[in-house]
């Protein structure tokens, strides 16, 4: 499973059209604190039941707090036939520290 860091994701979002799907798998309370603009929120535990809401062919960047839960979800998506999945290494925490310092860190 491939990974992408916050700086590269920022660049990709600015350059790539269409932009990748940003799949935020954190809990509701975490998303209420901070999220990357344009992210689609599906909590980790709901991903299997909501798989039909995702496009297996679309490039998808999976996001969580530090990159551990998202790594598990990215692995799961690959097992389900998703071919273009990336894990955001460092998660929203790294994004807030390196890309968007106005974002709350928790």
Image: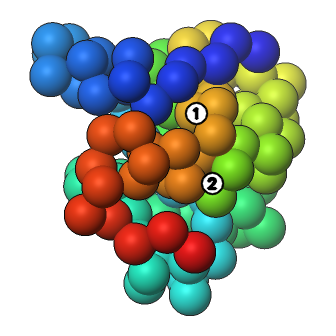
Q: Where's residue 8, x and y in %?
A: 39, 17
With respect to residue 37, does 94 lie above or below? Answer: above
According to the picture, the residue beneath numbered tag 1 turns out to be 88
Q: Where's residue 100, x and y in %?
A: 28, 50
Horizontal side of 64 relative to 23 (left or right) equals: right
Label annotation for residue 44: none
Q: Secondary structure at mark 1?
A: strand
Horizontal side of 33 relative to 48 (left or right) equals: left
Question: How is colour applied across the structure in the image?
Answer: rainbow
Name which residue lies at 51% across and 52% down: 92
With respect to residue 100, does 56 lie above or below? Answer: above
Residue 89 seen in the current view: yes
Name which residue lies at 41% across and 53% down: 96
Residue 18 seen in the current view: no
According to the picture, the residue beneath numbered tag 2 turns out to be 64
Residues marked 2 and 1 touching at CB (< 8 Å)? yes
Q: Quadrant of residue 79?
A: top right
Q: Nearer the viewer, residue 57 or 15?
A: 15
With respect to residue 50, does 74 lie above or below? Answer: above
Q: Earlier in the sequence, mark 2 or mark 1?
A: 2
Q: Where's residue 28, x and y in %?
A: 55, 83
Q: Nearer the viewer, residue 35 or 95?
A: 95
Q: Secondary structure at mark 2?
A: loop
Give the CA distance from mark 2 to mark 1: 8 Å
Name which residue lies at 63% across and 40% down: 90
Number of numbered discs visible in the structure rendering:
2
Image quadrant occupied by the N terminus? top right
Label 2: few (<14), some (14–19) or many (≥20) C-alpha neighbours in 10 Å: many
Horizontal side of 100 relative to 15 (left or right) equals: right
Q: Where's residue 62, x and y in %?
A: 58, 39
Name which residue lies at 52% across and 24% down: 5
Image quadrant occupied by the C terminus? bottom right
């Amino acid at each position: 499973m491939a990974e992408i860091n916050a700086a590269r994701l920022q660049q990709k979002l600015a350059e790539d059209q269409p932009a990748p799907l940003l799949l935020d798998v954190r809990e509701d309370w975490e998303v209420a604190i901070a999220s990357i603009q344009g992210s689609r929120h599906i909590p980790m535990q709901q991903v299997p039941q909501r798989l039909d809401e995702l496009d297996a062919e679309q490039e998808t960047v999976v996001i969580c707090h530090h990159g551990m839960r998202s790594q598990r979800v990215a692995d799961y998506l690959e097992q389900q036939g998703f071919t273009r999945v990336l894990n955001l290494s460092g998660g929203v925490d790294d994004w807030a520290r390196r890309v968007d310092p106005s974002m709350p860190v928790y």
